[in-house]
Image (spheres, rainbow, N blue to C red):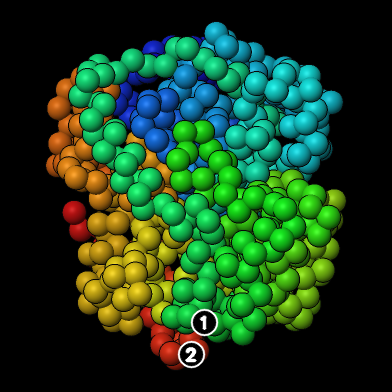
């Protein structure tokens, strides 16, 4: 176990053992607790004092399936609060196989500059002048880096949006095929990486320095049970990926459309997961594809054009929504192109799609004009004044047009579940320390009968407790590095105890279900403590007025969770 710390001000690199305060942590738990401990909450997110912390999950690098998840943490330039952004691909496994618990990037060059951080098979790190790569988009950048340094490397990088330090900028990582199509999208952490003068991180693949398990025998049986449960439950995800959700969420009237004016998209049949899969098959693409190391679900896909040429991977539910229904666009080819452009420019597809939706809602362009959306993204890459407004996310667009219908919390946009139709998501969006974030506490299944849920999705009853429990669980899941889609493994015989035993097997000491719950509480307390120090109050745990005042068709409901109930979410 080791930390690799890069001081961008001096160009120095130091490697050392993990401090005792952070032992037993990985992923989100490590990034959030470390940010709370070591970053001044009132600092400039793009200034000297912020840190960018890159940490594989605690179980990344083990034999457990679907654990190549990387957490990237910092003070967010988008929200002004704490942020952890989670991404797949191969980077987490590769860092773990080098025995690296975290990369900590601090300071910034006094005179700007562009640098590459290279980590070799021995785990040695060096900063390389990256002037030759300055301004490059991510696909061309990765191709050039791999040509120079070899194919057997994972790359984590930013595009022009990150270099421009735009607050919707993502950090892209390479997938199993070496393409920068996996995004740590939310929170604008690409801007933080850009502020550090760091263009890319290259990590050698095939390391042999993985942290040993304290008790390998204890690990084997629960890991096997967990994998079996994931495999048995993943058939539909393997065929349609997360796009399996498009049709059912639209059917229940919870699919935000035309900047959340409606809960259903009239042209939904043109953009469902089933339609996407059929188009991919007809054109010779891949409906099932392994995007991340150690994945046994294979929920990724390869979308191709009419000539069978690669366009993007993977076309997912949130992007189909944000670049589709949210902007009134029913052309999957345009959605795929917008997805590629976001990855190539280095932008969060959710924030960017919602930014475009706000611009259209304000009258800048009509809803449904996909080509207008493409032009807006190209403006981001070019660095035009309007491009920078789009690249700074929906709140910036709302301010520019003096437009009030901006669906954000703490400056971060909602995702593809309208909180008026799924009240539990209203609680998660409002109270998550990260800003509106569906992954922080996904309670869709508990709210929809179609998914086996038992809550009344239009009622406040039970929603706060359900969101609280989900947020606590996800904080721990993101700490150990298990893929969100692989949580079906918790349904294996032994349930949560399997995961706890695997953690114990690595730690070399007991780890109980009570410890799992306590871990979630510890993380959320650290995140909320940071935000309080940054100036956040309970008033920041609120949705925009539009969700309380505008009934959502077709059910014509509004959010009914009271402020008092919102404030009870984290009464631990």
Q: Secondary structure at mark 2?
A: loop
Separation of residues labelled 2 and 1 (CA atoms): 6 Å
Q: Residue at x 38, y 45 (%)?
A: 231
Which circle marks residue 1 in the picture? none
Q: How many marks?
A: 2
Q: Secondary structure at mark 1?
A: loop
Q: Residue at x 60, y 18 (%)?
A: 204
**Residue 89: x and y, percent?**
56, 37
Q: Residues within 10 Å of mark 1 (few under 14, many from 20)?
A: many
Q: Is residue 111 visible?
A: no
**Residue 440: x and y, percent?**
39, 54
Q: From the viewer's side, name the closer residue of 514 and 331.
A: 331
* Disc 2: which residue: 554
Task: Work out which quarter of the rendered image holds the N terminus and state it.
Answer: top left
Task: Work out which quarter of the rendered image holds the C terminus and state it.
Answer: bottom left
Residue 272 falls in which quadrant of the image? Answer: bottom right
Residue 41 falls in which quadrant of the image? Answer: top left
* Disc 1: which residue: 263
Q: Residue at x 35, y 36 (%)?
A: 480
Q: From the viewer's side, name the closer residue of 168 and 513.
A: 513
Q: From the viewer's side, name the closer residue of 552 and 111.
A: 552
Q: Earlier in the sequence, mark 2 or mark 1?
A: 1
Verify CB contact (< 8 Å) between mark 2 and mark 1.
yes
Residue 78 higher or lower than 506, as above or below: below
Q: From the viewer's side, name the closer residue of 561 and 118.
A: 118
**Residue 542: x and y, percent?**
40, 69
Q: Residues within 10 Å of mark 2 (few under 14, many from 20)?
A: few
**Residue 335: x and y, percent?**
70, 63
In the image, taking residue 552 as reference, residue 45 lies left or right, namely: right
Q: Residue at x 65, y 21 (%)?
A: 152
């Amino acid at each position: 176990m080791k930390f690799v710390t890069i001081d961008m001000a001096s160009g120095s690199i130091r490697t050392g053992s993990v401090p005792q305060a952070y032992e037993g942590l990985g992923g989100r738990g490590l990034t959030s607790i470390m940010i709370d401990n070591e970053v001044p909450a009132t600092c400039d997110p793009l200034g000297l004092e912020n840190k960018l912390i890159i940490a594989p999950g605690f179980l990344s690098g083990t034999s457990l399936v679907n654990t190549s998840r990387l957490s990237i943490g910092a003070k967010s330039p988008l929200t002004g609060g704490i942020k952890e952004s989670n991404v797949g691909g191969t980077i987490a496994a590769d860092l773990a196989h080098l025995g690296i618990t975290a990369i900590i990037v601090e300071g910034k060059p006094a005179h700007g500059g562009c640098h590459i951080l290279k980590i070799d098979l021995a785990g040695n790190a060096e900063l390389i002048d990256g002037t030759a790569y300055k301004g490059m988009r991510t696909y061309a950048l990765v191709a050039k880096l791999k040509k120079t340094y070899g194919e057997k490397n994972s790359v984590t990088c930013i595009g022009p949006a990150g270099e421009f330090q735009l607050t919707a900028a993502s950090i892209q990582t390479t997938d199993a095929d070496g393409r920068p199509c996996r995004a740590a999208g939310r929170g604008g952490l690409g801007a933080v990486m850009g502020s550090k003068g760091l263009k890319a991180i290259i990590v050698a693949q095939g390391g042999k320095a993985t942290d040993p398990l304290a008790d390998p025998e204890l690990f084997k049986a629960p890991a096997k049970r967990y994998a079996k449960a994931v495999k048995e439950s993943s058939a539909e995800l393997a065929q349609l990926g997360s796009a399996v959700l498009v049709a059912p969420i639209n059917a229940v009237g919870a699919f935000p459309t035309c900047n959340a004016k409606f809960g259903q998209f009239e042209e939904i049949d043109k953009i469902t997961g089933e339609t996407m899969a059929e188009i991919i098959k007809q054109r010779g693409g891949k409906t099932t594809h392994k995007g991340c190391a150690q994945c046994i679900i294979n929920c990724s896909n390869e979308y191709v054009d009419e000539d069978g040429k690669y366009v993007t991977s993977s076309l997912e539910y949130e992007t189909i929504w944000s670049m589709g229904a949210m902007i009134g666009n029913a052309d999957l080819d345009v959605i795929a192109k917008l997805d590629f452009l976001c990855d190539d420019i280095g932008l969060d597809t959710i924030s960017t799609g919602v930014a475009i939706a706000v611009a259209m809602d304000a009258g800048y362009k009509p809803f449904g004009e996909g080509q207008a959306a493409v032009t807006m993204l190209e403006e981001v890459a070019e660095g035009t004044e309007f491009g920078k407004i789009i690249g700074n996310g929906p709140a910036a667009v709302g301010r520019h047009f003096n437009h009030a219908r901006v669906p954000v919390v703490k400056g971060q946009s909602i995702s593809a579940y309208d909180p008026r139709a799924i009240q539990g998501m209203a609680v998660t969006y409002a109270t998550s320390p990260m800003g509106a974030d569906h992954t922080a506490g996904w309670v869709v299944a508990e709210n929809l009968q179609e998914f086996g849920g038992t809550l009344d999705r239009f009622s406040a009853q039970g929603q706060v407790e359900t969101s609280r429990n989900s947020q606590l669980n996800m904080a721990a899941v993101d700490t150990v590095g298990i893929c969100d889609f692989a949580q079906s493994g918790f349904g294996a015989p032994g349930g949560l105890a399997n995961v706890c035993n695997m953690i114990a097997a690595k730690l070399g000491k007991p780890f109980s279900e009570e410890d799992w719950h306590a871990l979630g509480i510890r993380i959320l307390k650290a995140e909320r403590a940071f935000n309080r120090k940054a100036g956040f109050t309970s008033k920041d745990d609120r949705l925009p007025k539009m969700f309380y005042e505008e009934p959502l068709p077709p059910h014509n409901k509004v959010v009914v969770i009271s402020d008092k109930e919102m404030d009870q979410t984290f009464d631990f």
